[in-house]
Image (cartoon, grey):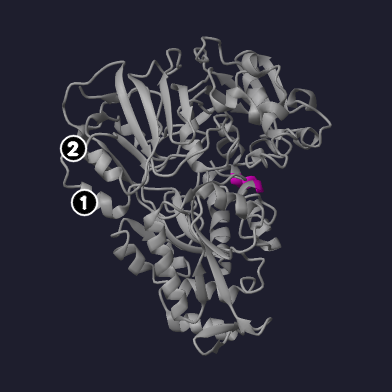
Amino acid sequence: MKKKKVVLTSFAVVATTSLLLAGCANNSVEPTDQNSSTGAASVTSNGDTLVVAQGTPWNDEFIPYMDASGYTAAMTQLSFDPLLNVNNKLQVIPWLVSKYQYSKDHKTITCWLQPNAKWSDGQPITSRDVLLDMDFLASPAYNGSQIQGQSEYLVANVVGASKILKGQAKSFADTGGFTIVNDKEFQVHVSQADAAFLTADLASITPLPYHVLKNIPFSKWLDMSYDKLPTVVSGAYIPVSANSQSVDTFKANPYYWRGKPKIAKVILKATSPDVEPALMADGQIDFAINGITSNDKIKMKSDPNIVETTMPSTEYAFLGLDDKKSYFSDVRVRQAIAYAINRNAIIKGIFHNMVVPTNSPTPDSYSWASTPESELNQYKYNPSKAEQLLNAAGYVKKGQWRIDPKTGKTLVLHMAVVSGNPTESTEATAIRQDLRAVGLDVELNNPIDFDTLISQLQNDAPGIDMWLMGNELGPDPDPRGTWGTHDAGNFWHYSNPEIDKLIKNTWALPSDFTQAGRGKQFQAFNKFVNQQLPIVFLFDYLDVQVYNKRVHIPSKYFGPMGAWPVGPDWTLSN
């Protein structure tokens, strides 16, 4: 989910990856019939192994939110469940929390945990486990220089969060932010009524086993063995082994509250996108979280052993711009770059129409909050318009290239590229050519892995002016965490008091406790971002889930959040 947290993905790989709500499938609790597209072969029960491919390596950090990468989140989703979930219509549904109730002033939420919710060692999941995760997210250890607290936002509005962050208190139980009524009932008290708090914050809390971790100080968590290979988990699968970001194995959790998984073992493998299609065609992998390119998916449609399911998406791709640089601080330059990029050529030539153009921070999947394209500047390909804007901003040509008026020298822009992703390299090259055609000298940096890119952006490393990335939202399109002036995920350093005001309006006005009321505020926010263009929007993804026909996935799992992770009612054919 996304409020002040960003679930980031490497740009330009069209594949389903559900990285929301701290690791939950977008389905209801009740079982449904099998997806009819998977065939009518016999199905095993409590047996066999599902081999899953991920095209980008992850970090073996199993505690949710310890690592900011969406690829790591995909791995942790197998082992840790959140408090609430969403169905395939983006509606909040019970999960570890069976029901909840607001107080009249919307500042207290009373929650009841599932009576049968247990840890994988058979111990009950309790209110104390919920409190432990919240205390960790607010702690100085989590928000220090090592971990950098990407998900502190989940508890920032809870009473006493600032005291814990400053080391003046250790627990929300002491600050008035959390009340344990009994083992299965608790209350969360917030400082300010917030229309998005339930879906964008509280829902994503993932309880941690207090009976296992109670004697280990938070300062030791990053290096403790539990983070590297936890033995007690709340999710459907228990980690068995973790092999340096390349192969992780999991076994079914016999105490899982939704029922023991029917697939006994899951193997998660980091594979090169170049070989994923062949591995799936040969039956060496059964399911791909990401990494398979649009070209390969088109070819795979002819394989009778492979199933493709297309779903709407909550993810958009963008070209990041470092707006603190003098040349990008001018909105005319940012708009010029948007006009200069031939998005339709990229969509047709590279993605074969498996993505759709977008010009807004709120994807169309959020029908109540998105803005019709007809009401937005669509930035259709217009290199002449791009040149006019650049000239007006003072970046005129001298020979082939444009001159930076502040230095009198050629303006050279450096674009970061993620390694191991041939599609991204192709897109980066196409964008570079478009920008060079209007006189912007763009150079592609040597490829780096995704985690290194994130680290460099977090630490304002020099030598990166532009980068390609995807941003996947949660069930609530709350813009906090990404778009605010001081938000941790605002890697483009856009600063404007007006955008901060518009962001607050999406959650703070009294009418915002209704979806219709909040939707009106999102219109103003979307249109402002569309005009100011802190980043260049490229397209919304259409999630195309690819898997072997021997995998049987109930239809309830397919929706804007994707089909991952493996549910207890997934099955495999003999």
Q: How many labels does the image show?
A: 2
The image quadrant of residue 37 is: top left
| Most distant residue in the right direction | 168
For the point 58% across and 85% down, the residue is: 392
Q: Can residue 92 be seen in this view?
A: no
User: In terms of sequence position, does the residue under pointer 2 or pointer 1 come before the other?
Assistant: 1
What numbered label is drawn on residue 305?
2
Residue 553 in the image: x percent, y percent?
29, 30
For the point 21% across and 37% down, the residue is: 282
Q: Is residue 190 visible?
A: yes
Q: In this view, does 477 lie above or below 539?
A: above
The reply to whether the magenta stretch includes residue 191 is: no
> Dot 2, how many residues are within 10 Å of its Cα: few (below 14), some (14-19), or many (20+)?
some
**What stretch of residues is rendered in magenta?**
508-512
Q: Distance between the residues labelled 2 and 1?
A: 13 Å
Residue 22 in the image: x percent, y percent?
52, 34
